């Protein structure tokens, strides 16, 4: 079985325990979020466009505040305490929202609080997971292992909704909050197990305290070129997602709400199934055979081509194909590839700057692009859907070119490290 596992995943036997526990870790995290997502996504139907835009703007501001507080805490307590404390905090927050609901707080206000907080949580908990995970692996290991680990998120994304469907018949809607709260606590023993498994790795030896400067994460974002480029990569990713989203809304507008729900549910199932297949069998092989630059750019360039095709023929089948490529490709290939980039930065950037990029920059991108699309459309320039999709394709090309740059830079630095290690290991002979 070990030999078969190694052949399928390219994960070595001595790496299997850590990879499997990490797989279970992200599985629990994603399932806990997917339990909440149907409840969250049902709320905006009762709001107007302005109210939704306001919620997105509040989400961005709260995300920035949240990562700032996190950075401050990271400067005061050790990582060994910080990582589990984050999940305990989120578990307590959802239990508190449940309590406020039971006590009869205004449901409309509480619904908006829940929507915003869940949107912050949806990015924050996965970002902390990858900060914690990436410290244990070298650049070479990450290319083989991260694709498999990330597959756990897709399995969790499938199991979470299935759990909701089976629970809604017997559990009140508010009870979902307690289920998520309890499931988040399940990761605590997994963190302990991973600390023990990775205790011998050079990258995870030091789980002590980070620098006392609470603004170090923001400073690195502004002054470190590679980190700025990673942030720009995320920013362009959110832009492409926004243009694909408007294409989806336009294509599905002629269908009834029930038909939309059916098509999107089938799409989600196909996305998660394809993500699992790619994550287990393809991601590590793409990264190793064609390099990180290919892994970071193949999806952006594919999305650009489909956006141009869609601009000429905006049929719903092409929209669904575009979403299938974008989402499954991102989950299975682009996301693990960009996490590999963080194995090449320092511990401070990994734990302090990465959440700023993953949460605040991501949500800031959402706000920027939704207003940009509004200006391009009926807000000012009156672009047609085809013209908007051309703009989206241009952004996707820039996204892909940046992926090529980041991948090549990472691999160039990796080669230099190997060469330096080989030189230092070469014995010096005296004549």
Image (cartoon, rainbow, N blue to C red):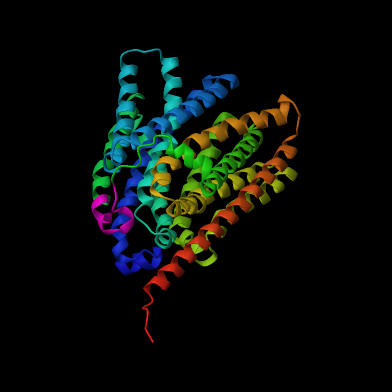
Q: Main secondary structure of the magenta part?
A: helix
Front-lying residue, 187 or 142: 142
**Displayed quadrant of residue 121:** top left
Report the quarter where the N terminus lies. bottom left
Decide if residue 383 is on the left or right side of residue 149: right
Residue beneath the point at 56% across and 60% down:
408
Q: How many marks?
A: 0
Of 314 and 217, nearer the camera is: 217
- How far across and down, in percent of the image, does residue 385 sit? 72, 36
Residue appearing at x 28%, y 53% in the figure: 205
Instruction: Tell me, yes or no, if residue 165 can be seen here.
Output: no
Range of the magenta residues?
A: 195-207
Left or right: residue 93 compared with residue 233:
left
Q: Is residue 237 above or below residue 65?
A: below
Which residue is found at the position 33% from the left and 51% from the top?
A: 22
Quarter where residue 95 is shown: top left
Give the image location of residue 396, x and y in percent: 64, 47
Residue 71 vs residue 82: left or right?
Answer: right
Residue 319 drawn above or below residue 370: below
Is the C terminus in the top left, top right, bottom left or bottom right quadrant? Answer: bottom left
Is 407 above or below relative to 51? below
* Residue 56: percent from left, percent from top: 53, 26
Indicate yes or no whether the magenta region holds residue 201.
Answer: yes
């Amino acid at each position: 079985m070990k030999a078969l596992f190694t052949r399928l995943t390219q994960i070595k036997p001595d790496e299997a325990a850590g990879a499997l526990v990490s797989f279970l870790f992200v599985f629990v995290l994603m399932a806990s979020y997917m339990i909440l997502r149907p409840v969250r996504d049902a709320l905006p139907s009762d709001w107007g466009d302005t109210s939704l835009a306001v919620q997105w703007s509040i989400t961005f501001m709260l995300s920035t505040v949240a990562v700032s507080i996190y950075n401050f805490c990271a400067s005061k307590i050790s990582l060994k305490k910080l990582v589990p404390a984050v999940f305990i905090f989120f578990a307590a927050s959802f239990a508190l929202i449940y309590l406020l609901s039971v006590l009869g707080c205004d449901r409309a206000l509480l619904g908006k609080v829940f929507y915003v907080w869940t949107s912050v949580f949806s990015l924050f908990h996965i970002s902390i997971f990858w900060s914690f995970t990436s410290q244990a692996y070298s650049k070479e290991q990450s290319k083989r292992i991260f694709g498999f680990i990330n597959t756990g998120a897709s399995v969790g994304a499938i199991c979470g909704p299935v759990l909701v469907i089976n629970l809604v018949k017997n559990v009140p809607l508010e009870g979902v909050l307690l289920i998520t709260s309890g499931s988040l606590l399940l990761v605590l023993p997994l963190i302990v197990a991973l600390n023990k498994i990775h205790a011998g790795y050079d990258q995870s030896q030091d789980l002590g305290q980070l620098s006392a400067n609470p603004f170090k994460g923001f400073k690195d974002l502004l002054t470190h070129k590679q980190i700025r480029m990673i942030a720009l990569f995320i920013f362009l990713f959110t832009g492409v997602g926004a243009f694909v989203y408007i294409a989806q809304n336009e294509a599905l507008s002629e269908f009834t709400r029930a038909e939309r729900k059916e098509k999107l549910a089938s799409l989600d199932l196909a996305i998660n199934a394809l993500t699992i297949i790619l994550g287990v069998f393809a991601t590590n092989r793409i990264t190793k055979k064609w390099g990180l630059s290919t892994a970071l750019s193949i999806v952006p360039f594919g999305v650009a081509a489909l956006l141009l095709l869609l601009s000429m023929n905006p049929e719903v089948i092409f929209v669904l194909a575009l979403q299938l490529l974008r989402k499954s490709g991102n989950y299975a290939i682009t996301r693990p590839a960009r996490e590999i980039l963080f194995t090449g930065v320092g511990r401070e950037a990994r734990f302090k700057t990465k959440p700023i990029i993953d949460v605040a920059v991501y949500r800031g991108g959402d706000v920027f692009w939704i207003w940009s699309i509004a200006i391009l459309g009926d807000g000012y320039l009156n672009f047609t859907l085809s013209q908007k999709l051309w703009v989206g394709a241009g952004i996707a090309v820039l996204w892909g070119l940046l992926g090529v740059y980041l991948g090549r830079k990472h691999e160039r630095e990796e080669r230099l490290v190997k060469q330096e290690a080989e030189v230092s290991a070469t014995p010096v002979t005296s004549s």
